[in-house]
């Protein structure tokens, strides 16, 4: 198995592409603020999945999945913020939020599955 085969990686990779698409429409004066932070947190989700998958131990893998989940929650807040200050519309926000919820559930399931393997 390869990390590209993981559904949670596939979904989080798609979410990164969606986040990049919406950041194009954010105000240019936010390029080094919200826009940059939103992109970094989005990219961090699948990146941590990849890095954890490539580690030597299940315990390390789990830690990277926790990092991924933390980045996902950071991104969820930033998406809420850009919606709340009217940089994106409700349809955009609801789709992205729904995707985040799904990825969060997938990360939690993977973490729990891996925890069972180390007990």
Image (spheres, rainbow, N blue to C red):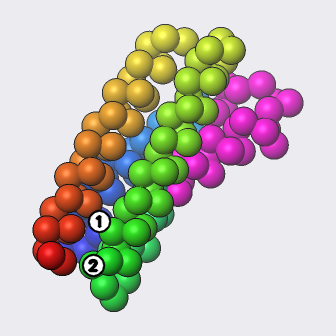
Region of the chain picked out in magenta, as a range: 23-44
**Residue 55: x percent and y percent?**
37, 83
Question: Which quadrant of the structure image shows residue 80?
Answer: top right
Residue most toward the right? 29
Residue at 56%, 32% in the rendered image:
77
Q: Residues within 10 Å of mark 1 (few under 14, many from 20)?
A: few
Res 26 visible:
yes
Q: Could you say whether the residue bearing mark 1 is in a helix, strand or loop?
A: helix
Residue 37 belongs to the span the image colors magenta: yes
Q: Residues within 10 Å of mark 2 (few under 14, many from 20)?
A: some
**Residue 95: x percent and y percent?**
39, 23
C-alpha gap between disc 2 and disc 1:
18 Å
- Residue 58: assigned label: 2
Q: Vertically, is 20 above or below 108?
A: above
Q: Considering only order in the chain, which callout, 1 or 2, is on the residue closer to the N terminus? A: 1
Residue 45 belongs to the span the image colors magenta: no
């Amino acid at each position: 198995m390869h990390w590209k085969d993981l559904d949670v990686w596939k979904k989080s990779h798609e979410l990164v592409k969606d986040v990049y698409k919406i950041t194009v429409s954010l105000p240019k004066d936010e390029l080094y603020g919200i826009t940059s932070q939103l992109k970094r947190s989005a990219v961090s989700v699948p990146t941590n999945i990849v890095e954890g998958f490539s580690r030597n131990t299940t315990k390390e893998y789990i830690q990277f999945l926790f990092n991924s989940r933390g980045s996902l929650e950071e991104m969820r807040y930033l998406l809420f913020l850009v919606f709340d200050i009217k940089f994106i519309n409700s349809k955009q926000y609801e789709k992205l939020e729904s995707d985040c919820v799904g990825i969060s559930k997938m990360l939690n399931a993977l973490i729990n599955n891996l925890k069972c393997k180390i007990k």
